[in-house]
Amino acid sequence: MAITNPPLILIVEDESGIQLALSLLLELEGYRVMQAGDGEEGLTCLAETVPDLIITDYMMPNRNGLSMLREMRQDPRLAAIPVLMLSAVIPPEEDAYELVDQFLSKPVMAGDILTAITSLLKNGRGAS
Amino acid sequence: MTAKTQNTPVQTAHRISTGCAGLDTILLGGFLRGSVFILEGSPGAGKTVLANQVCFHQAQAGERSVYVTLLAESHDRLLKNLSSMSFFDADLWPMSIDYISGFHILTTKGLNGILELIMKECRARNASMLVLDGLFVLEENVQSEREFRKFVNDVTNLAALMDCTVLLLTNSRQQPQPRPEHTMVDGWIEMNTHQLAYRAYRDLSIRKYRGSDFIPGRHSFTISDEGVRVFPRLETVTRREIPEAPLEGRVSSGLPALDKMVSGGFPAATTSLLFGPTGAGKTTLALQFAAAATAEEPALFYSLYEAEVRLRMKSERLGLNVGEMMDRGLIHFIWTPPSENLLDELGNKLLRAIKKHKIKRLVLDGVDAFDDSAVHPERLPGFLNALNSELRRMEVSSLFTTRTEILPPPTFSVNLGNLSAVAENILLLRYEEEGKHLRRYLSVLKVRDSAFDPLWREYTISQGGILFTDGPRDPASGTG
C-alpha cells in the first residue's frame, strides 16, 4: 500500500498571530503547512512548490491576495489549485469570484475553515 | 456534592455567564464569547476561585473547559482546596474540566510549546473556555517584553479561531498601570484586597471591556464556601425611574393614635424615619408597624441589632402577636449582626428578600449600623437614596429606626445626619426628666404632602406597646 503525503496547504497571511493560529490548527488536523507573509512571498513559495490548497487573506502589504491569485492563475501548474480567502470584506474587484473558490469572513471559526478545506480538497475548484 | 450556582443563566446570545450573579450584572451579562480577559490581583485575591467558578458553571451546562496552570501548586492540592466550595462538583471533573500543568512544557518548549498545548487541548476537548493560570510565570520566562506581547496576541488569535473564551490569570503589580498586554486583550478585571485599620475588605473593578458596556467603578466582593460573590454598588444598579404619580393611599403605622396625627397613616410607599435615643421605644414602635402586616401585604423585619429570639420575647412581653405572625409567614425576619458587613451586601440581601417574599411593609431596625458597615462613609447618602428609590419603585412602605442623642430643652437639638434627606416622613422620640420620673415624648417633624400634628405627645410603653397618654389632636381641626 502506497503511503501518501498529507495535503500541503499554503497560508498567506500578514497577521502573524492569525498565521500561527491557522498553522497550529491545520498541523493538528494532520495537514502539512507552508507560510507566507504577503502576496509577494506567496508567489515566491509557489514558484518552488505546488500546494494542494491555498488559504489567503485579501488585504496585505506589498501585494494583496487577489493580485497574487491573478499572477498565479496564469501559471498552468497552479491554475487548478483551490483557494479559500479569509477576509473581513468581500473584495470589490470583478474577477474576485473567478480567482477565489470560497470566501469566509473574519473572524473565522476553526470548524468553518476545516469544513471548507475538506470540501475544496475533495471537490477541487468550484466545489462551493 | 451538588453544584450550586448563584441563579444565573448559563449564557445569553454571545455572552458567557460567570456563574457569579453580581459579576454578570457588572459585565452586563457576562463575558462576550471568544473574548480574552486578564484577571489580575494579588496572591489570595480570589482569581483562581473565580476562574474555577466560571469553569464549573459552564460545565453544568455541558460546556468544556481547559485549565492550564503554570504555578507550582499541584492540581491535587488545587482540587482539594476547591472541594469545599459549593460550586465544585466532583462528577464534572475531569470530563468537563481538564486540568493541565504547563510548567514543564514552558521550560522545555517555550511559549510556542504552550500555544501548541492550548490549541491541541482545546481542539481535542472542544473547549469553549480556557484558563491560563500564572501569566506572570510566562513573563518571567521570556527574553523580552516584545516576545511576551506576541504571546498574548497569539493567544487572542487562537481564542478567536477556536471560539473559546479565555481568562489569563496574573498577579497585580505594586503600582497597577495599564501595560501593553492590557491593550491587546478584550477585557481586564482587577481584584483587590484592602486593609483599613484592623479591617480587610475586597473589591473588584472592570478596567476594560472591548465591545461591551459595563458598570464601572469598584464593587465589593466576598469569598466564602459559595465562591466569589460580587455585590455591585447599589447606586449603580437600582432602577432610576420612579412611578410618575406617587402611590395613592395611606399605610397604618400600627398605632391608631399615631395614624390620626399623620392624617390617617403614612403615605403609601414612602419611607418613615424614626429617630430616638436608646430605650425610647424605637423597636417597640417598629414591631407595632410590622404587626400591621396582612397576608396580602407581608412585612419584613430586618434587624441590625436584635436577634429573632429576643424580638419574639420582647413582642410577647408587650402583648404583640409578632411571633405568631412570623410563624404564619406574615412577617419575615432577617438578622444581620452589626459587625464587619459590606454595605452593598446588606442592600443586596434586603432587596432580594423583599422581592422573594413580595414584601410591602419593611422595618429596618438600626439603620445607624450601616454607618459601621460603610468602608467609605461618604457613600452612605447615595447608597440610602438608591435604596429608598428602589423601595419606592417596589411599592414598599418602610420604617427605618436609628439611634440618635437628643438634648432636652432648653438646648433641645438633634443631629439627623445624612438620613433625613432620604425620608419622606420623620418622627422623633425623646425623654424628659420630671422629678423622679422619666417621661417619653413623640413628635412628627415631617409627612410628605400631608397635614400632621406637630406637638410633642407623651406616651408610655406597656402591655399593647406604645400608648399615648395625652390624646392626639386631629391636625385637620387646626388645633394641633
Image (cartoon, rainbow, N blue to C red):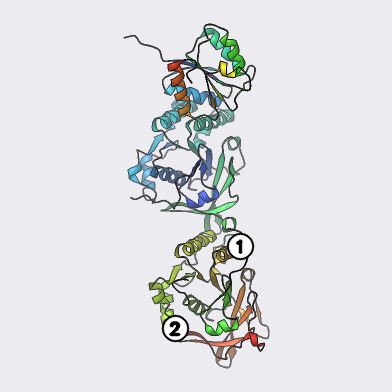
Callout 1 secondary element: loop
Q: Is residue A111 above or below residue B33?
A: above
**Image-based side of B323 in relation to B185, left or right:** left
Location of residue B116 in the rendering, given as x and y in whole percent from the top left corner: 45, 27
**Image-based side of B299 in relation to B378, left or right:** left
Q: Would you name the residue on which mark 2 appears?
A: B318
Location of residue A119 in the rendering, given as x and y in whole percent from the top left corner: 44, 20
Asked if residue A2 shows in the view, the reply is yes
Q: Is residue B342 above or below residue B75?
A: below
Location of residue B334 in the rendering, given as x and y in whole percent from the top left corner: 45, 67
Q: Quadrant of the N terminus of chain A?
A: top left
Find residue B242 and name its label: 1
Q: Nearer the viewer, mark 1 or mark 2?
A: 1
Q: Amino acid at mark 1?
A: Ile
Q: Amino acid at mark 2?
A: Leu
Q: Residue at x 64, y 85 (%)?
A: B476
Viewer-closest of B6 and B89: B6
Find residue B371 and name its label: none
Location of residue B433 in the rendering, given as x and y in whole percent from the top left corner: 59, 89
Q: Is residue B203 above or below residue A79?
A: below
Give the farthest residue toward the left. A1
Asked if residue B106 shows in the view, the reply is no
Q: Chain of mark 2?
A: B
Nearest to N terminus: mark 1 or mark 2: 1
Count residues near mark 2 (Cα–Cα under 10 Å), then give few for <14, some for 14-19, many for 20+: some
Q: Chain of mark 1?
A: B
